[in-house]
Amino acid sequence: MVQFSSVLLRKLGVVACMGAAALAMGTVQAQPEWPGKPINYIVPYPAGGTTDILARLVAMKVGQALHTTIVVENRPGATGAIGSAFVARAAPDGYTLLGASTASHAINPALNPKLPYDAVKSFAPVVLLGTIPSVLIVGPNSSHKTVKDLLAAAKAKPGAVTFASGGNGTILQMSSELLQQHENVRMTHVPYKGDVPAIQDVIAGHVDFMFAPTAPILPHVQAGKLRALAVATAARVPSLPNVPTMAEAGVPGFEAEQWQGIFAPAGTPPAIVQRLNAEINRALQDPEVKAQLDKLGIKIAGGAPERLTEIQKADIAKWSRVGKAANITLE
């Protein structure tokens, strides 16, 4: 039987410890620092919309700060559900982000019980980018000079007043549904395939009114082709300083804002989420970004990831109530 001296055993122990330490260091070194490759930013809507424009602004600024490329990829369909489902299934490694909105992450889960993901549990909130006010608009020749005029007409002839939207289940339809429930009136919905044709028919007088985001209607209002009767926000909008809030127009307690935010797949490491949150918050204060957001009528939000969760959960509850009362479902 081979006998080993105590000195040799001590030497072998030292070598073993050094080997284990070296192996551990090698394992740590084998894990590249994030981000070690391009980040995919999924937009669940077509190119050119608000979510897409925001994504490209964020991708440019945050990509520079992180010394990487952020690739914006459009995966539209099903009111944002297709792109959202893709991100929900993605690896939670910090290399996939989702540009989300009220439509995809509040109205969709409120109206569609068959979504292939949980709008809250399947995602990790990163940041609330901003909010977009809805504006109640009528055509230039409309007999409705105020919100009270519009509501009086709706009460006098239930169903006779018509409202447009960019499609069934959109925030624009839901805002008008909320107004009907808030004021106990009945009006008729006229859905369009997108906001632009809906706005055009309001201008032409084919539809009585609609709620619309500020950016696409602002030039028409300034040119006198549309009249803005009220903004559905708690405070007046800087780009429309002479337009009253719904409360000032005689409808207290009525608000209908859209929001834009960024999510990652659930399980994304908190350190990565916090780094993204910090860099995006910094980007939102960039003068170039702020100028672009002003043009889009977006009020910058930012803040901690929890702020996005709070507004999302509140809106899911709000639009669930509205959808149930109006018997609206999406599948």
Image: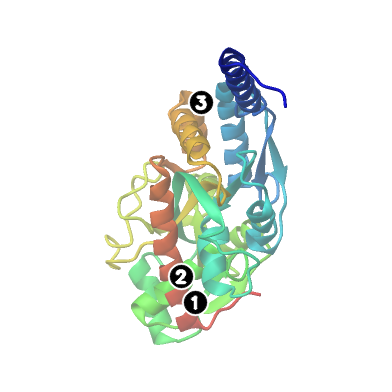
N-terminal of the two: label 2 or label 3? 3
Quadrant including the N terminus: top right
Instruction: Identify which residue, 271 or 175, lies in the foreground.
Output: 271
Seen in the picture, residue 311 relative to 6 is either above or below; the reply is: below
Identity, as a three-letter code, of the amino acid under mark 2? Trp
Seen in the picture, residue 107 relative to 212 is either above or below; the reply is: below
> Is residue 263 visible to us here?
yes
Mark 2 neighbour class, 10 Å CA radius: few under 14, some 14 to 19, many 20 or more: many
Q: Are marks 1 and 2 in contact (CB under 8 Å)?
A: yes
Which picture quadrant has residue 305? top left
Instruction: Identify which residue, 40 or 50, lies in the foreground.
Output: 40
Instruction: Identify which residue, 72 or 28, lies in the foreground.
Output: 28
Q: CA distance from mark 1 to mark 3?
A: 38 Å
What residue sits right under mark 2 in the picture? 319
Q: Secondary structure at mark 2?
A: helix
What residue sits right under mark 1 in the picture? 323
Numbered tag placed on residue 288 in the rendering = 3
| Residue name at image x 64 percent, y 62 percent | 79
Identity, as a three-letter code, of the amino acid under mark 3? Glu
